[in-house]
């Protein structure tokens, strides 16, 4: 837990270093209709950075899904609390949460736990973050 601020800082620093690809027709994209270019860019950069941090850590500092969700919540607050996007798009937060937790769920899991397909929980969260990123673009 004492490393969460370090992870948050690293994520904010890495905001623009992850390439994008994938499906742009999901629920997140639908909820963002009417979003400005800047809003889309900021959210895409955030979730790209979150994917990067999740993959780089792989469960070393961020041990489990409750810690990962707390880190995400704190980083979102730091990144967006004073921006007008907060609450602007009804249902966007739920659409993002649904996509982020797809295949992982709300059950507390270690990030290095292997899933049935040979990937880890961290791998799945990484992929889900990239899916959110793509839909925000």
Image: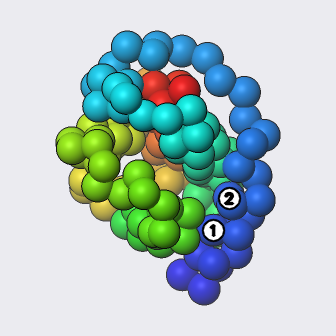
Residue under the point 42% across and 34% down: 35
- Residue 86 visible in the snapshot: yes
Residue 22 versus residue 115: which sits nearer the camera?
22
Q: Residue placed farthest to the bottom in the image? A: 2
Quick check: 70 above or below 132? below
Residue 39 versus residue 6: which sits nearer the camera?
39
Task: Determine which quarter of the picture holds residue 123.
Answer: top right
Residue under the point 59% across and 58% down: 59
Q: Picture coordinates of residue 74 (x, y %)?
A: 48, 71
Quick check: 131 above or below 112? above
User: How many residues crowd mark 2 within 10 Å: few (<14), some (14–19), many (20+)?
Assistant: many
**Which residue is disc 1 drawn over?**
8
- Residue 98 visible in the snapshot: no
Q: Picture coordinates of residue 92 (x, y %)?
A: 29, 41
Residue under the point 37% across and 13% down: 25
Report the Cα–Cα distance between label 2 and label 1: 5 Å
Q: Is disc 2 in contact with disc 1, using a CB cutoff of under 8 Å? A: yes
Residue 18 versus residue 90: which sits nearer the camera?
90
User: From the image, which quarter does the N terminus lie in?
Assistant: bottom right
Task: Determine which quarter of the picture holds residue 91.
Answer: top left
Q: Picture coordinates of residue 66 (x, y %)?
A: 37, 66
Residue under the point 68% across and 58% down: 11
User: From the image, which quarter does the C terminus lie in?
Assistant: top right
**Which residue is disc 2 drawn over?**
11
Tell whether 43 sits left or right of 106: right
């Amino acid at each position: 837990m004492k490393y969460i601020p370090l992870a948050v800082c690293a994520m904010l620093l890495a905001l623009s270093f992850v390439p994008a690809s994938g499906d742009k027709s999901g629920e997140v994209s639908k909820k963002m209709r009417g979003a400005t270019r800047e809003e889309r860019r900021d959210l895409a950069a955030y979730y790209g950075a979150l994917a990067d941090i999740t993959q780089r850590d792989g469960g070393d500092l961020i041990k489990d899904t409750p810690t990962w969700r707390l880190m995400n919540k704190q980083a979102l607050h730091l990144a967006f609390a004073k921006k007008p996007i907060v609450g602007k798009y009804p249902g966007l937060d739920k659409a993002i949460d649904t996509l982020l937790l797809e295949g992982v769920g709300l059950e507390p899991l270690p990030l290095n736990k292997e899933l049935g397909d040979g990937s880890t929980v961290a791998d799945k969260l990484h992929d889900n973050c990239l899916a959110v990123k793509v839909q925000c673009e």
